[in-house]
Each structure stands twice: as structure tokens, then as C-alpha cells.
Image (cartoon, helix red, strand yellow):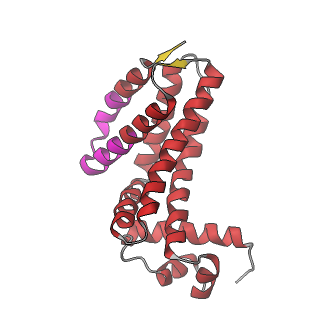
Amino acid sequence: MARMPSAERRRQLTEAAIRAMARDGVARTTTRSIAAEAGVSLSVFHYCFDSKQELVESVITTITDHYVGIVKEALKPRASLEETVRAGFQAYWDHVRAHPDEHMLTYELTQYALRQPGFEHLARRQYELYGELYTDIIEQLSKTMGFQLAIPVPALARYLAAMTDGLTLNYLVLGDEDAWTDILDTVTAHIAGLVSA
């Protein structure tokens, strides 16, 4: 096995954990199965991660990073704020459709963390991360497009996190792809209504 920097090895193991957890479920995924998925020895896993908590936090952050970069790229200013926001939601929606198992895993990780003594802070951190990401996106758009909000940024960020969370779960349960165009258009119009130039 070739030597690789510790940070790169952690990324490799985290991606392997995501694949294993998405396939087998969080509770049935063991450190041994993650090491096997990554093609490394169990000792390499334990060298890179001190605890299962550390691994779960890395998985949550990595899954979020998978779609945040895509959404931020899609949010480049367009002719109108509405078009820009709609493009961001579309990029997120396209990621949900392309990677439903990853998004399903985020809900399982939340439930796992809430039920596992000592892991509760990871569920809180997961949702704080969502709010922080939306805050960053809103502030960036506000600077580049020069708009004012009718409500405080933290309130809108939390609202957007809750809304996308609920819509994602709704899609994962019902699988109604046709309804999403109307839903995204409605959400986009609502968000645009909270903004003044």
C-alpha cells in the first residue's frame, strides 16, 4: 500500500465510510467494514480517527461539502435575484436526485447521533453547519447583488435550512420528481419577496 499524507488518508476513509453507511446503514457499518471499503488495514483507520465520533463528524462535513460547492457555483449572479436563487435551488435539487443515498444518510446520521449517548452534539453541529452555510451564501449574495433583506440573515438562514431539509425528506419519502419544479418556483418567489433592492 502506498504511503499517503494523513489528511488524504482521512478523506479516503471518510468517503469509504459514506459509501458503506449509505449502503449498509450507520448502525451496521463497522470500522472494519470501512477499512475494507477503503482497501486499508484496520490499524490505518485507527491511526487516522481517534473515535467513531470523529469519523461521524467528518462524514457529516464531507457530505455537506459535496453539494455546497455545487450550489455556490450555481449562485453566480444572473440577470435577477430570482434567477440566481432558482439556479442555486436547482443545483441542490439535481444533487439530491443524483445522490439520494447520501442525503438519506444525513437523516440517519442525525437520528444516530441523537440516540447515541455522547454523540448528541454531532446532530446539533450538523444543523448549525447548515445554518452557517446558508448565512455565508446569503451574505455573499447580498454583497455581490446589493440587496437588503426584510428579515434578519440568521432567521432566513435557519428558515432555508429547515425548508430544504423538509423538502429533501419529502422527496426521499414520496419520490415525486414532477412536483419539484412548482415547489422550487414557489420557494424562489417567496425568498425573492423577502428582499428589497
Specify start and end residues of the magenta stretch as a single range. Answer: 164-184
Figure quadrant of the N terminus: bottom right
Where residue 78 sits, quadrant-wise, is top right
On the picture, is 94 further left or further right than 45? left
State the residue at coordinates (36%, 38%). Answer: 163
Compared with 121, 149 (above or below) is: above
Q: Where is residue 98 in the image (x, y as percent from the top left)?
A: 44, 50
Q: Where is residue 81 in the image (x, y as percent from the top left)?
A: 53, 20
State the residue at coordinates (53%, 25%). Answer: 84
Overall secondary structure of the magenta section: helix
| In the image, farthest residue toward the left | 174
Number of numbered tags placed on the structure image = 0
> In front here: 133 or 169?
133
Where residue 144 sits, quadrant-wise, is top right
Compared with 151, 163 (above or below) is: below
Q: Position of residue 176 (x, y in %)?
A: 27, 41
Q: Where is residue 62 in the image (x, y as percent from the top left)?
A: 55, 58
Compared with 173, 183 (above or below) is: above
